[in-house]
Amino acid sequence: MERSRRYLARVFRWLSQPRTVLHVGLAGSHRCIVSEDDEGRRYLQFGWDSAYQSVMGQGFPLRLELEYTQGMIGGVAFVANPQRILMIGVGGGSLPMFLRAALPQTHIDAVDSDAEVLQVARRYFGFREDALLHAHVADGRRFIETPGPAYDVILLDAYGPRGMPKSLATWEFLQAARARLAPEGVVVSNVHRSPNPLYPAMLQTWRASFVQLYAFDSQTTANRVFVGLTSAQRVSRGALKARAARLARAARFNLRALMSRRFEDREVRRASLEGHALPKLDLVLHDED
């Protein structure tokens, strides 16, 4: 019933906001569909009835159209001067391109498991690699578990037509991601609160995996952005404001207002400092579940 309701809602959206179809990919795990509206915004979907994976307007790459992507940039502000950033899940490439423009000295690795997604990002969304922005066709978990350089920020946005793969949501995976972080590094993830039957378990898994946990909620969708820190050292409000200001110089959205909407799961830090267990740890997702 819920699946039918979502399908009808998306069909209605197509009819109420007609767009020109520019590309229909081959049937498969990611069937890339690209369309364009009358104002020049381009949309990437994985299947006709899926949510938007990327939306990019004529002001790309600096205009992040989807609200949750702005929240993920807010997560980047928790690191003072990121030298290396890893992005798992490319979509149309708006996030890595924004970061390339906002942090011109930062090395960025963008990983997607589907070569067609990268081809579509290059052809229809202006995604371009250079000396500091590298694209990789690889399984995201395998890429993280393979020994390599440490990252200051790891961004997780690897959604397919059926949501995020469970292999990228377990405690074991988050431990592998933590192991690839530089000191004071952060893991940032886009998570759907609903419809997502795994959300309560995903929340408890993140709470069990990090020393501090922050979040940004989208006001227009059910997206929540988790920001997991491995250090108990707080980032002051002033430091966050200063770092956000640096990113805001490239942003065409109100990053300072977004930073003011962050909230902290204070029980996570308190449990880490006092050495006691959090409740509901039985909900934590594991590989063997």
Image: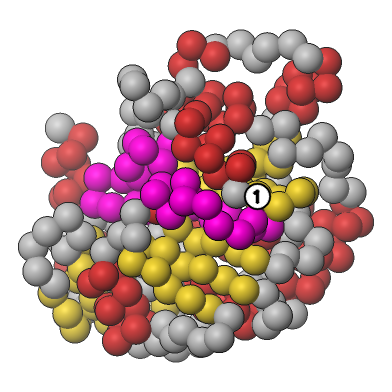
Give the side of residue 33 with respect to residue 135, left or right. Answer: left
> For the residue marked with disc 1, what is the amino acid?
Leu
Percent of width and height locating residue 58: 44, 88
The part of the image, by quadrant, that contains residue 259 is bottom right
Residue furthest left as drawn: 27
Say if residue 44 shows up in the picture: no
Look at the image and say whether residue 160 sits in the magenta stretch.
yes
The part of the image, by quadrant, that contains residue 167 is top left
Q: Residues within 10 Å of mark 1 (few under 14, many from 20)?
A: many
The residue at the point 83 percent across, 22 percent down is 273
The residue at the point 62 percent across, 74 percent down is 107
In the image, is residue 124 above or below residue 269?
below
Percent of width and height locating residue 256: 76, 63
Residue furthest front as drawn: 147
Near-viewer residue (116 or 143): 143
Percent of width and height locating residue 224: 52, 44
Near-viewer residue (97 or 113): 113
The residue at the point 16 percent across, 63 percent down is 31
Asked which secondary structure carries label 1, the reply is: strand
The residue at the point 28 percent across, 52 percent down is 160
Percent of width and height locating residue 91: 36, 67
Quadrant including the C terminus: top left
Q: According to the image, label 1 marks what residue?
A: 181
Question: Which span is picked out in magenta?
Answer: 141-169
